[in-house]
């Protein structure tokens, strides 16, 4: 999942728009999200309130990709609101880092 800061007319600062991107390569996913965001408006050139203009928010789990029916190479808009339902807190296969 990629967040892109987009300048919107009438807004005092750029707003973050979220995209689900069907690429495992992070750089490629970010560029595809930028391409899609540019259809909405200009992308911010510098950080906004400490957030980079384009950043990977979270890697989507395979179950989330399946639930979204996201195809390889596809870019899907998730909207302006924090997409908490797409970010899961599934435990990693490695387990906790502190040894518990």
Image (cartoon, rainbow, N blue to C red):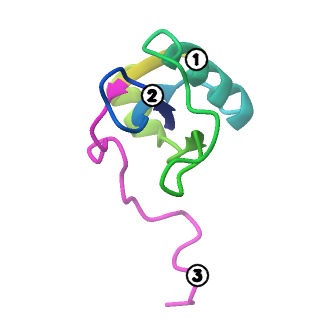
Indicate the position of residue 63 as horizontal and vertical percent values: 40, 38
Neighbour class for label 2 at 10 Å: few (<14), some, many (≥20)?
many
Find residue 94 and report its image quarter: bottom right
Earlier sequence position, callout 3 versus callout 1 = 1
Residue 19 bears which disc, if any? 2
Residue displayed at 48% across by 9% down: 39
Indicate the position of residue 50 as horizontal and vertical percent values: 53, 57
| Magenta region, residue range | 78-100
Residue beneath disc 1: 72
Indicate the position of residue 76 as horizontal and vertical percent values: 42, 19
Residue displayed at 41% across by 33% down: 18
Circle 3 SS class: loop
Residue 13 bears which disc, if any? none
Indicate the position of residue 29 as horizontal and vertical percent values: 63, 28
Residue displayed at 59% across by 47% down: 47
Residue displayed at 56% across by 23% down: 33
Q: Is residue 36 above or below residue 25?
A: above
Q: Is residue 45 above or below residue 47?
A: above
Q: Give 34 or 26, whichever is nearer the viewer.
A: 34
Left or right, residue 28 beside residue 96: right
Circle 2 SS class: strand
Neighbour class for label 3 at 10 Å: few (<14), some, many (≥20)?
few
Find residue 65 and report its image quarter: top left
Earlier sequence position, callout 3 versus callout 2 = 2
Residue 97 bears which disc, if any? 3
Say whether marks 3 and 1 touch (CB < 8 Å). no
Q: Work out whether residue 21 can be spotted.
A: yes
In this rendering, which labeled residue sits more in front, label 2 or label 1? 2
Earlier sequence position, callout 2 versus callout 1 = 2
């Amino acid at each position: 999942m990629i967040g892109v800061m987009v300048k919107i007319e009438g807004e005092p600062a750029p707003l973050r728009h979220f995209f689900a991107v069907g690429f495992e390569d992070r750089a490629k996913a970010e560029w595809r999200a930028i391409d899609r965001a540019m259809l909405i408006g200009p992308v911010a050139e510098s950080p906004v309130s400490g957030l980079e203009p384009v950043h990977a928010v979270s890697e989507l789990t395979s179950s989330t990709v399946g639930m979204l029916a996201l195809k390889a190479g596809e870019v899907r808009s998730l909207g302006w609101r924090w997409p908490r339902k797409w970010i899961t807190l599934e435990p990693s296969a490695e387990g906790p880092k502190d040894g518990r």
